[in-house]
Each structure stands twice: as structure tokens, then as C-alpha cells.
Amino acid sequence: MAPNIDNEETVVVDEVLDLGKLAKEKGSYMVYPDVKYPPLQPFEHKDPGKLADPKKASLFDNASKIYDLSPHVGTVIEGLQLSQLSEQQKNDLALLAAERGVVFFKKQDLNPYQAIELGRHYGPLHLHNSTGHPPGLPEIISIYHDETNPAVRNANAFRSASDGIHTDISYEHNPAALSILKIDLLPLGPGGNPVGGDTIWWSGYAAYDRLSAPMQKFVEGLSAVHTGEYHKLLAQKHGRPIRREFPPDTVHPVVRTHPVTGWKALFVQPGFTKSIVGLSKHESDAVLKFLYNHVAGGYDFSVRFKWEEGSVGVWDNRCTFHCAIFDYFDTGRRHGFRVTPQGEKPFYDPNSKSKKQAEEEARNANKQ
């Protein structure tokens, strides 16, 4: 449902608006309009990944190079422009992201308008109710931090980086399906080379597979409460308007089934998960702390991506966690922009399989 943005600040912009250049020249350009969005309505999601070619030939046959960054998560595609993908390539990308968690594209010409168009292929775009965005483009979330903002630097100075692990907007009834992020400005070190500002992703599939069988059985029967309280308090702290009331706390399964792959993925994270339904606070805190540490310590099922200006990450929030690394506040500024299509309400199918189980069965079938 489109928001009411009649009173929102608007500007006339060029269709090749360069937000990276704007951030470099003007710094923080974002607006926080005091307007009201209507509540989001639940919807039934039709995932384009279900229309994909299992071989993903439209991508593999046309890219100049495709390679995995780690065994469980992260694939790089070279030689394709996201701004020029065909319908079939967009569908195949949805499947690849569902399988590999996050897909990276380098040297992209994608502008904000093209990002919005691409994102809408994967679901209704989430209009964030408290973060900043470019004037007139509420579909875009601007990612911007620099060395001149002591409030942000101080807020993160004594905070564990793992506290920032999350999946985007998991507190919504229909959380994020994919997220599409372009980084176009990086902090520079003393030698003038980009340094810092990496992002880490973890595989939710492998996080589930790495649990013991008794623990898998235990967590599969649980549901967790997700809350947007962090974003709400952040907006209030900085005196920024909340454009749509945050939804009541939502309940999602601790282990969810991916609608495209059919694989089980762990789906709790310190960013927005509040508690586990049916457990006492002591029990809930203990279980969540274990699961958070399990993910944060998952060096064997994570990938750390070193951004280049013009790189784009396309990740599936239903089977990954991610965390930005704030190690550059004394170095320089970092900027990017993101669109976030929403997906289905998370569900758990007791007949679904783990990624490890599905792959083992496929290998055995091929031997026969």
C-alpha cells in the first residue's frame, strides 16, 4: 500500500541522480519528513524465484565470471549489469540468492530509480517509517556515516559488533524478502585507498545445520517475538518523526522454511528478536543468548565482503543474517542506498528439509 506523502518534501531530480556524488560533496543529504504513512496490510507473496530456471542459465551463460566466496554463503557475478537484467534473469537471481544467501555484483551503474524498479520485481517495497531517505524517494534507505558524527561514533564505541547482527525488518508481519544495497562511497585510509566498512553475512541454513539433532528438534517447535523497538527508540532519541506507527510485536518461527528452496533456516537475531514464546524470561534469555553466540561464532558459515565503489549486494533475508562493520568512524565517510522488497509471512513446514539433508539426497540420487 502506498503511503500518504502529499506533504513530503520533494525536489526535481535527474534520472541519473548520483547519490554517492551527493554524499561526497554535501555530506548527509537525507530528509526525515514529518508525514504519516498508513499501516502496512498483510499480503500473500508470490515469489519470482519459483519462476526460475533450476540451472539459472540466463545468468550463468551470460556472465563473464561467477564464483563462490565461501562454501556456504556468498557468490560473485561479473559481466552483468543489474540495470539491464531480463525478466528471466531477475527470476534466476531470486533463486540464486535463495540458494547462496547473498550475491555480489561489481562495477554496477545501478541508479536509485533503477534500484526501485528492480526491487519491485521481488515484492512490494518497504517504506521505512523512521530512517532517512533522499528527498522525494521514500523507497530508498540511505546508508551514510562519517567521521564528523560523534553521536554515532560514541554510540558504537562500547557496543559489540555482534549486537548488530540482524535480518532486515523482521518485526513486520511480512518481513523483507530480498535487500538490494549499492555502496558508492568508501572511507579512505592514510594512503588514499578504501579501508574499512565491510559487511558480514551468515547462512541461516548452515546455522541450523550446525546445531545438534536434539537442539534442532527443540528449536523447531518454538516461535519468537520480534520488535521494532530499536528503531523507535533511535528515532525518539534523535527527535525524528515516526511516519508510521511501529506494528505490535510480531511472532515468527525460530526455524523458518524458505518458500523457494524448501530448506530450513534459523530465524532469530539480536537486532529485532525480543523473546521466545512460552518460555520464562530466564529460559528465553538463555536460549536466545546461545543462538546469538552460535551465529556470531559461525566463522565457518559466514563471508566478509570488502566493498568496492559501485558494488551491489543482493541478499535473501529469509536465509541469512548480516552485520555492517563500523570500524571507520575515525577514517572517513561511507555511503550507499538500499531498497527492500517484502516477502511472505515466515512459516515453518515440518516436512521441510535442511540444506544439508536436501543436498545429500540429491547427491545420492545422482549416483543411482
Image: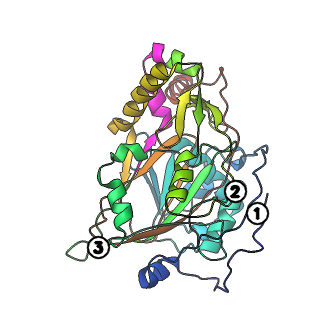
State the CA–CA distance, disc 3 to disc 2.
37 Å
Q: Position of residue 276 (x, y in %)?
A: 55, 26
In the rendered structure, are the residues bearing label 1 and label 3 in contact, judged by CB atoms less than 8 Å apart? no
Label whose residue precedes the other's in the sequence (1 or 3): 1
- The residue that disc 2 covers is 244
Classify residue 230 as left or right of residue 118: left
The residue lying toward the viewer, choosing from 298 and 232, is: 232
Residue 68 to residue 346: above or below: below
Q: In the current view of this chain or complex, which residue is farthest to the left?
A: 190
Q: Quadrant of residue 119?
A: bottom right
Q: Which amino acid does the dot numbered 3 rest on?
A: Leu
In the rendered structure, are the residues bearing label 1 and label 2 in contact, judged by CB atoms less than 8 Å apart? yes
Q: In the current view of this chain or complex, which residue is farthest to the top?
A: 214
Regarding mark 1 in the picture, which secondary structure is present there?
loop
The quarter in which the N terminus is drawn is bottom right
What's the magenta region? 200-215
Tell us which disc is closer to us: 1 or 2: 2
- The residue that disc 1 covers is 3
Residue 217 to residue 359: above or below: above
Regarding mark 3 in the picture, which secondary structure is present there?
loop
Label whose residue precedes the other's in the sequence (1 or 2): 1
- The stretch drawn in magenta includes residue 92: no
Residue 88 to residue 322: above or below: below
Mark identifier at residue 188: 3
